[in-house]
Amino acid sequence: MKTSKISFFLNQAAQKKISIYHIITTFLAIISVRFCIELWATSFTSHDTSFYFFGFLHTTLFFYIITICCVWLLVRIADLPITHALTLFLYGFLLVIFPPIIDYIISTSFYNGTQFLSYYLFDSLPGLWHSFLTFFGDHPRDGITYGTRTIIILTIFAMSTITYYSTKKISRAFLIAFCTYIVFFFFSALPSFLAALVTDTHVTIAKHSVASFIASPTNILNNPITHPFNAIVTKMTLVYILIALILTIIALYKTQKVRLLSLLKNVRPIQSLYHIGLVSVGMGTAVIFGNGVFIPNFFSLLAILIIYCAVIIGWYGTVVFNDIVDIEIDKITNPTRPLVLKTISVRSYGHIGVACTLLSLLLVACINYHATIALIFYHALSFLYNTPPLHLKRFPLIATFTASLASFCLVIMGYIMITDTHSLQHFPPHIAILLITAYTISLPIKDLKDIEGDKKNRVYTIPVIFGEKIGRLLIACGIFISFTLSIFTFNNLSLLWPALLAGTLCFWTLIGTRQKKFIFDPYTSVGIVFVIVSLFALILTISLL
């Protein structure tokens, strides 16, 4: 009788339909309650803004990753549909609010109110093995505290119970219990594993070395972090961002394979590399001209990787809005786009665009608040360029000038990231003029592939107005002029022959013909020009060092 009641409850709970928006809001609400209880346990001691921002984000990402891992275990071992597994885990997620309450009660009852320090396991590899065998070690007043251990036990018990009543196999129940424990232990000891992986000591890592690696004051892209707690949550937040992005893509591949592949095929490699290059130009300008200092350490490199991810995600958000407006154009010139193939609805695609935009802003804010303003400017210009009622993309020169300003915003973002003042102070005005001019007269190259669709929908690009032949000639001249302008901008005659060679190669790539046909199609032309520009940028950088 008892078994049937439990099975009935589990089935009823699992089969309730909950929208993704309710799942997200419930998840964030529980995390907010947990975070506020932690602040209450410390008497709401005043902290700086970064403490609250990274503290909340760190907690959110940690439990988001744990949720993905545990739901995957329920799917694989308990044989539950993913919607049932997610719903059941969400009910049990309320447990996360109790660790600070349990710690507070035990502290005031048995330890005269001494505050417990709940964070991570800092230890050597032999010490971690001992902690693994003894359920997180012998010191429950710090690291993995009484409250955290209690909730882990309850989670393991709940996962085992669900698995047993789902599969009727005791072996599966023990397996999921063991796997759940491994998940919690791995992420509880992740700083120690990272220290062993990336520091010089490797397998001989000691407890104090882990603390030094993760909790010592540091400088990440000219952002000084002095407080040990801020150092821990900031560094681990950067790690969790990357893990969360990877796990999210894997989860989407397992649950929405067709849609995900359709979206990933819409990621244009040249455009992605172009946007990464813009940020890199800004960073390089900061180092060479803006007193910027780049200290190559693990977390600085991780921060740059996150910036690049943010830029690609943000750019993809602008692509989404462009695709929604240009469905009719894409039916002619880009038939493999998601909306044309109908692998996703316009509404869902719009939601993805909004999500990508907000996520890109959040990721950049994790690295530098000031740089977020430049990214907001980029998104604003892109929106005006891509969408009605203005839809500036329709008007020649205005369109390319707007696009060049949006591109320059990413250069500004990269510059602000690295410079010591996190501002545009010391940004060379002649470089700004060169970049904006070069982008304005060169960016029409991207319109070559859309001539037929743009013409039919009255989008008046340079190739539409003048035709492909003259359009290619004008674009080739613009790119050649951009190369030659660099010689005078930097007053560097050593760039003369590289600039002339690069400009000539790009010119020939665009207008070269064979048997009255252009040698390279628009896509190949863009790729070749991008490679040549990248090589020239490398030569230019070397000449300035």
Image (tube, rainbow, N blue to C red):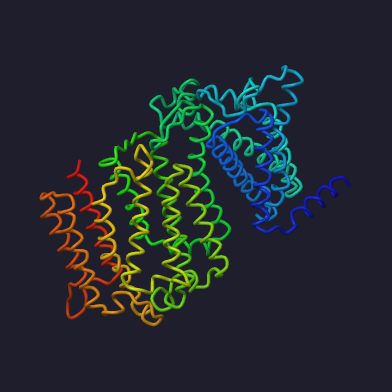
* Residue 75 against residue 160 in the figure, above or below: below
Residue 495 at x, y percent in the picture: 13, 51
Horizontal side, residue 66 vs residue 231: left or right: right
Image quadrant where residue 186 sits: top right
Residue found 11% across the figure and 49% down from its top: 494
Residue found 29% across the figure and 46% down from its top: 427
Horizontal side, residue 383 vs residue 256: left or right: left
Q: Quarter holding the C terminus? A: top left
Q: How many marks?
A: 0
Residue 318 at x, y percent in the picture: 45, 62
* Residue 106 against residue 450 in the figure, above or below: above
Residue 315 at x, y percent in the picture: 42, 58
Residue found 48% across the figure and 63% down from its top: 263
Horizontal side, residue 363 vs residue 83: left or right: left
Residue found 72% across the figure and 22% down from its top: 107
Spot the residue most to the right: 1
* Residue 62 against residue 271 in the figure, above or below: above
Front residue of 132 and 36: 36
* Residue 124 against residue 397 in the figure, above or below: above
Horizontal side, residue 204 vs residue 349: left or right: left
Residue 52 at x, y percent in the picture: 57, 37
Image quadrant where residue 224 sits: top left
